[in-house]
Amino acid sequence: MAPDRWVVIDDADPGLDYSGTWFSDTTGSQDNVGNFGPPYLDTLHGIRADGSVSLQFNGTAVQVWGTNDVVNFDTNPDPTLQCFIDGTSIGRDTPFQFGENNWKLCGTSGLPDGSHTLQIQVKVQSSSQTFWLDQIRYIPSPTLPLDNKTILIENDDPAIQFDAQWRSLGGTANLTNEQGSVAQVTFVGTSISWYAFIPTEFAHNASQGSWSMDGGEENMFLLKGLPTDSKTTIYNQKYFTTPDFPAGPHSLAVTFHGSGQTTPLCLDYLYVKNGSFPATHSSTPDAANTGTSNSDNGGASGGTPVGAIVGGVIGGLAFLLCLAAALLFFKRRRQKNERYIDVDPQYTAPTQFSLYQNPHGAVPDTSTSYMSQTIPPLSPPPVSMTTPSSYPAHMGSNLPRKLLQEAQRGGYTLYHTSNPSHSQTVTSSDSSPWVQSSAHTDSSRTHEPIGSERLSVGQPRVEDVPPQYTQE
């Protein structure tokens, strides 16, 4: 799954449509508000009366960031705002009692991919209060060109690779205090900015790092550290911004030159200027050139046509049906031939013939391909016979061969119709010639009575001589 990469829109972007008495602040008047760092690109738009601002974007999520500076935050916040997506309110985030820059004011996710309109309506009750807008972020549509856009890349993005000396810091950033440790960043764009925070839990002494682009010369930057007595972590600190390079893919290497006794090197997120990412889908002919649209071919943008797939599936099913019909035909033909077996006229077939003496009452499924094989003579030790019903249904034709063989050797009764006293029971311990020589056992048909020579089980042949004849 691709990571979330946000397009960042500065408050001074010409794509924003301001309504009301807004003004721009580029003096840095709010840079030292709170400990969340200065505003993005050191610019803000403010208003001291009611007003609104809107932005049209293509994406699936959006966030509004600014400076939190309100009074009566828990009862009647002033100033306040309400955000709308395509005319539907998404509300606002809860204001904070203390002033902070880089504060999320409202946002939503899970929007249908496509074009949306964000509108921010601002209410200011007192002219001594100011609403400050800093930036708007949105997750772009996958097909949206990102040329001339600024992209935010989080520290856990796979485009960033840390060596073994780096470690995670609370899951929100990465940090190292080992001299010589390196982080590599691959990106597409013209410039990149490195943002981090300065944790108070580590050494406060200033230190240095360096960056190089595409294996070029090293450029040093300062890690200014914190005052000795500071107990507050400072966030959203920009360590460096590279100059513009030719648009295209680049590799940034950042090296820490400090030690365990100096401020560590940290990474929270990156801003990539004029960023774009390689396409992950193949192009298709233009609908105007092919004479068909995506809706005509099921919305497919490439690969095998849907019609060919459906045709292949139907053809395969037809082949399987024909194969099944052929197997059924040959099976019935074989049964028909076997009904003409030469039966001694002195014997009459019993009306019922119980072949399997299964204690559970289940007849083993002998319709598998295993039964078409010649069964060698076996003299296994007594085993506890398991019926097919105890096997999972999904095994189908994969029932164990041993189970089928045991079922074939199950006890059965040989009936003598003229003299029942000569009937005999053959148990599973018999290795009868009939079991050994049978190459095609089919439990789906009625088994013929014992009366021919090939069905002899080794007992003397018993014959009844009619009274009008004298035996020679």
Image: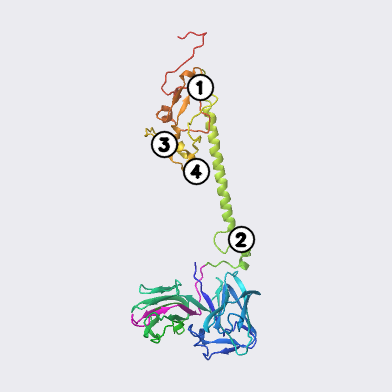
Residue 125's place in the image compared with 332, above or below, is below
Q: Residues within 10 Å of mark 1 (few under 14, many from 20)?
A: some
Residue 298: assigned label:
2
Residue type at mark 2 is: Gly
Circles 2 and 1 in contact, beta carbons < 8 Å: no
The residue located at (55%, 33%) in the rendering is 332
Residue receiving disc 1: 343
Residue 15: assigned label:
none
Examine the rendering and report whether any part of residue 241 can be seen.
Answer: no
What element does badge 4 sit on?
helix
CA separation, marks 3 and 2? 57 Å
Is 270 covered by the magenta stretch?
Answer: yes
Name the foreground residue: 32 vs 65. 32
Circles 1 and 4 in contact, beta carbons < 8 Å: no
Q: Position of residue 68 (x, y in %)?
A: 55, 83
CA separation, marks 2 and 1? 65 Å
Q: Position of residue 293 (x, y in %)?
A: 63, 65
Residue type at mark 3 is: Ser
Where are the magenta residues, as a range? 254-280
Residue receiving disc 3: 384
Circles 3 and 2 in contact, beta carbons < 8 Å: no
What element does badge 2 sit on?
loop
The residue located at (52%, 88%) in the rendering is 30
Examine the rendering and report whether any part of residue 66 can be seen.
Answer: yes
Q: Earlier in the sequence, mark 2 or mark 1?
A: 2
